[in-house]
Amino acid sequence: MALVKIIEYAEASPEVKVVYDDIMKTRGVEWINNFWKALANDPKQLARVWAQVKQVMAPGALDPLVKEMIYVAVSATNGCEYCTFSHTAGARKKGMTDAMFMELMAVVGLANETNRLANGLRMPVDAQFIP
């Protein structure tokens, strides 16, 4: 159950519809997911977050699939079920296989374990690691 109203396209303000239209055009889809529909309760925040997503997730030095897989890893680590599902779907659309997903989750699990160990042990950072 959402904590805010889900703003469907038909009931959206003109300001929100502009963002919804851009999301659908940019993503090549004919629907708006519930994350954006919830954010639409604050049209300025909706526009700001969408602009950031377009900028950060656009092709650059990192391949779009790599960016989606990083998003999956962070979402899983942060415990965001919605984002884990959403970005796993996005990564699969960009070519992630089940084997890649399982390997990603193994890396996520290992990194979380060793991060907790390193934080608990509080050893100094090796000088060789520092640029």
Image (cartoon, helix red, strand yellow):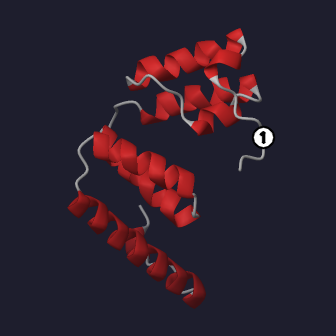
Q: Which of these two is toward me, 91 or 114?
A: 91
Figure check: 94 above or below 85: above
Q: Quadrant of the C terminus?
A: bottom left
In-image side of 64 versus 16 (left or right): left
Give the residue number, with chain letter if any, for mark 1. Answer: 4
Residue 38 shows in this picture = yes
* Residue 68 location (% of width, % of height): 38, 46
Q: Which of these two is toward me, 41 or 116?
A: 41
Crowd tier of the residue under label 1, counting other residues whose Cα lies within 10 Å: few below 14, some 14–19, many 20 or above: few
* Residue 104 location (% of width, % of height): 32, 64
Q: Quarter of the image holding residue 4?
A: top right
Residue lying at 57% horizontally and 62% vertically, measured from the top left: 78
Total numbered circles: 1
Q: Quarter of the image holding residue 129?
A: bottom left
Figure check: 123 above or below 80: below
Q: Residue furthest bottom?
A: 121
Q: Quarter of the image holding residue 58?
A: top left
Q: Which element type, helix, strand or loop, lies under badge 1?
A: loop
* Residue 125 location (% of width, % of height): 49, 77
* Residue 70 location (% of width, % of height): 41, 53
Residue lying at 57% horizontally and 58% vertically, measured from the top left: 80
Figure check: 113 above or below 2: below
Residue lying at 28% horizontally and 40% vertically, measured from the top left: 94
In-image side of 57 versus 35 (left or right): left
Residue lying at 34% horizontally and 46% vertically, measured from the top left: 91
In the image, what residue type sits under mark 1? Val
Q: Which of these two is toward me, 117 or 106?
A: 106
Residue 16 shows in this picture = no
